[in-house]
Amino acid sequence: MWVKSRLVLTTAFPPRSVGKFVRFDVDEVFVGQFEHAIDIKGRIVLPASFRSAFDESGFLIKGSEGCLALLTPARFRIMAESMASRSEGGDVRHRSAKRSFGAGASRILPDKQGRIAIPEDLRSFAHLERDCVIVGAIDEVEIWDAVRWREATEVGDSLLESPDQFIDGAAS
């Protein structure tokens, strides 16, 4: 069942209403930031703490603000099902968004060293050339160009100066 006003994390977090989010369940909660370099073959090494969530596979998609988002298969399925159900009504915009979402996604299979290959079109979208930052963004992993990440964190850090605007129960 889809709930549009509740974000549910099944690991370490109680359910809280945090605005208009689609309900999802996650097996992993991703936190931390890790600096890495992209090798000559366009691969990055996943941080050890993230690898178990992507043992079988994962999905890279174009993320917000010019980063890439790495999703677990369960998270990707939930997003894809939501897009598919919205596009059934015949709205051209929803079908177009679904088409672009699918075309821009890439299934990844980590190798034995925990490396994933980032397709050229996604590296180009995120301006990934060499230095990158892999970020745990709670329900997904984001991959940022290092310079763009520094710019994005300035904005995010300033927003969290008043965390009660974004996190239920943050104000004591």
Image (spheres, rainbow, N blue to C red):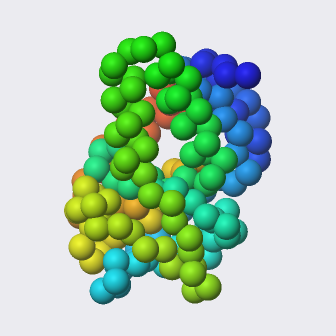
Residue 5 drawn at (x, y percent): 61, 18
Residue 144 picture quarter: bottom left
Residue 11's place in the image compared with 114, above or below, is above
Identify the residue at image location x=61%, y=54%: 72
Horizontal side, residue 51 vs residue 67: left or right = right
Horizontal side, residue 151 vs residue 164: left or right = left
Identify the residue at image location x=66%, y=47%: 74
**Residue 42 seen by the camera:** yes
Residue 138 drawn at (x, y percent): 58, 48
Residue 118's place in the image compared with 140, above or below, is below
Identify the residue at image location x=36%, y=49%: 104
Horizontal side, residue 130 vs residue 137: left or right = left
Residue 23 drawn at (x, y percent): 65, 29
Residue 101 drawn at (x, y percent): 40, 41
Q: Quadrant of the N terminus?
A: top right
Residue 107's place in the image compared with 93, above or below, is below
Identify the residue at image location x=27%, y=77%: 130
Residue 114 picture quarter: bottom right
**Residue 153 seen by the camera:** no
Which one is nearer the viewer's eye here, 41 or 48? 41
Which one is nearer the viewer's eye here, 145 or 121? 121
Residue 161's place in the image compared with 104, above or below, is above
Residue 64 picture quarter: top left
Which one is nearer the viewer's eye here, 95 or 26? 95
